[in-house]
Image (cartoon, grey):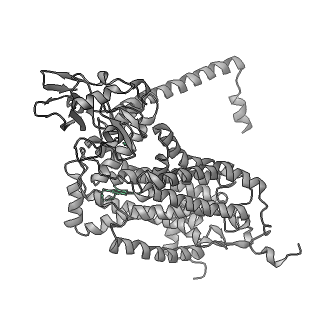
Amino acid sequence: MSNEKGWGMRAFDWFEERLPIVSFIDHSVGSKYPAPNNLNYFWNFGSLAGFMLVVLMMTGIVLAMSYTPHVDHAFESVERIMRDVNSGWLIRYLHANGGSFFFIVVLIHIFRGMYYGSYKAPREVLWWLGIVIYLLMMATAFMGYVLPWGQMSFWGATVITNLFSAVPIVGDEIVTLLWGGFSVDNPTLNRFFALHYLLPFAIVGVVVLHIWALHIPGSNNPMGIEVTANDKIPFHPYYTSKDVFGLGVFLLFYFTVVFWFPNAMGHPDNYIPANPLQTPAHIVPEWYFLPFYAILRSIDDKLTGVILMFGSILILFVVPWLDTSRVRSANFRPIFKVLFWIFLLDCFVLGWCGSQLPEGLPLILTRVGTFWYFFHFLVLLPVVGWIETPRPLPSSISTPVIASPAE
Amino acid sequence: MGDLAETQSVPTEDESRRDFLLHATVATGVVGAAVSLWPLINSLNPAADTLALSSVEVSLAGLEEGQAATISWRGKPVFLRYRTPAEIEEARSERWQDLPDPQPDEERVQDDRYLIVVGVCTHLGCIPLGQKTTETRGDFGGYFCPCHGSHYDVSARIRRGPAPSNLEVPEYTYLSETNVRIG
Ligand code: HEM
Ligand code: FES
C-alpha cells in the first residue's frame, strides 16, 4: 500500500506527463508560488479583479443571448431582459454594476501599486501590462454602455467618438470610419457590440501576461524591500484562504448595490430611448470616466483638451522613470506619502468636477486639479525622489528596524 | 552544435545574396500583409446604402420670420432659421476678420434670410440649443451648446467656448424660392 499509487493518482500522473496543466496552475497561484508573508489586504484586489472579469464575461454571454444589436430593437430587448427573461433583471444588474465594481477594484489595485512603489524596477513591464488592461477595460465599458441605446448611450458615444475629430488633418475621416456613417447609428451599434464581446477576451490574454510578468520577480510587499526565501510562504493555502475571505467581504458590498441600489451608479436618462435630434441637458459619463472627462474640459481648446485627457492616462507608462526614488514603499518616504494622499484627493476632486457643468467654481477646481495632476507626475515625483531622506529600511521583513536601533 | 555552425558558414559573396533574398521576402510579406488589411479596415467606412441616403428636399414656405425648424439629414439635425432683419444686420455689423473662425455672414447663406447649418456642435457633436425661442441662445444670440459651453452667433459662427469652428454649412441648392435640396 505504501508505495502503490491508486488508479486515480496514476491517471493523473499520466495526464500531467502529457500536459502539465495542474502543476502549471499550482506554480502560478498555488502551493508552488512563494509569496511574501507580510502581504496586507490591499494585495487581495488582484484576485478580486480576476473574479469580476469572470463574472462580467459569464453574465455578458448570457445577456448577449437575449440582446438585439439594432437601433430599432436594442432598447426594447434590454427592457425585455429586465421584465420577461427569467432572472434577466438579476443578470443585467450583476453585469451593469459589475462594470462599476470591476473599476473600483482595479482602481484600488492601481493606487496600491502607487503607494507601495510596485511599478519600480524590476516590475516596470508588469506595470505596463496593468495599464494596457486598464485601457482595454475603459474601451470595453464605454462600448458596453452604448448597447442599451438610451439617451446617455447615444450621446456618450457621440461625444467620445468625436474626440478623434481633434486629430489634425484626418480627424473627420477617422470619425466617419469609427461610425460607419455620418453620425452614431446602426453600423456603430453593431460594431460596438462585436467589440464589446471581443475585448474582454483580449483582456484575459493580457491578464495572463500580467501574471506571467508578476512571477518573474514575485510579489512586492508593504515594506517594498527584497524578500528572502525565509520570509516567504506558499500562496496556497495561505493567500488563497485570505483572498477567499476578502472575496466574501467584497461580495457583501457588491450584492448590497445589486439588490438594493441597482441604479445608484447609473444615470436615469439612460432609461429614455436614444433620440439623435435631442441632446440631454447635461451629459455625464459613467463615474469611472469623470476625472478624465474633467481634464478634457479643463481647457477651451479642443485638441489640447483631448491631448491632456489621453496624456493623463498614458503618463502612467513612464511613472517608473519619473519617480527617481529607489525606495519603493511610501511607508518609508515621508514626503511622498503626503503627496500620494494629496494626489488621491485630487483625483476625487477631478471626479466631482467632471459631474458638474464647466463653469464657476467647478471650472476653477477643474483647472487647479488638472494642473496638480500633471505637476504631481512631471515635477513632484522626480524632485521629491532627489531631495527626500527616506526612513531607514529594514534588512528583511523579519528584522524590523525598531528591534535593533543600534545598528 | 559545432557541426551545425560549420554547415551554416558560407562564403561572403553568397551571404549578401542571401541577405538580399531575405530582405526582399520580408519586405514583400510586410507590404502584402498591410495591403490585405485595407479591405478589412475599409469595410468599416460608410456602406453604399448609407451613402445613398445623402440628400433631402425641404420646403421653407411654412417658416415665419423669426421661426426655426429642424430636419434630419444623414442622421444629423439640420437647422433652418428664418432670420429677422435685425439679426441679419447684427451678423453683418461685426468685423468678421476678428472672429475665432473668420468668415463673413454673406459666405454662409445663399438667401440672406435663411440660415441653413448642420446642428452639430463642432466641439464634440452635441446639438446646440437656440432653435426654440424658449431655449437659451448663448451670449451672442445664436446658439448655445450646453455640453461644454460653446456660444455661436446668429450666423452660427463660433464666438466663445471650446468648439474650434463655425457650425458647418451643408451643400445645398435652392430648387425654387422656398424649396431647398440639402446634400
Ligand atoms: C471587461 C468586461 C466587461 C465590462 C467592463 C462590461 C461592461 C458593460 C457595461 C458598463 C454595460 C452597460 C450596462 C447597462 O447600463 O445596461 C454592458 C452591457 C452589455 N454587455 Fe458587457 N462588459 C464586459 C464583458 C461583456 C462580455 C464578455 C459580454 C458578452 C458578449 C458582454 C455583453 C454585454 C451585453 C449584451 C450588454 C447589453 C445589455 C445591457 O445593457 O445590460 N459584456 N457591459
Ligand atoms: S459638444 Fe458642444 S461644447 Fe462640447
Depicted B99 relative to depicted A222: above or below: above
Q: Nearer the viewer, residue A244 or A175?
A: A175
Which quadrant is home to the N terminus of chain B? Answer: top right
Q: Nearer the viewer, residue A71 or B182?
A: B182
Q: Is residue B6 above or below residue A374?
A: above
Q: Position of residue B172 (x, y in %)?
A: 22, 24
User: In the rendered view, would you say B80 is above or below A94?
Assistant: above
* Front position in the image: A269 or A107: A269
- For residue B42, side relative to residue A244 (left or right): left
Q: If the image is split into quadrants, where does the C terminus of chain B sit?
A: top left
Residue at the right extreme of this rendering: A406
What residue sits 29% from the left and 35% below the top? Answer: A182
Name the residue located 44 percent from the left edge and 51 percent from the top edge: A359
Specify whether A13 is left or right of A100: right
Residue A134 position, x and y percent, is: 50, 54
Q: Which corner quadrant of the image does residue A269 belong to?
A: bottom left
Q: Which residue is drawn at 30% across and 64% down?
A: A92
Measured as percent of width and height from the top left, residue A168 is found at 46, 30
Looking at the image, can residue B116 be seen?
A: no
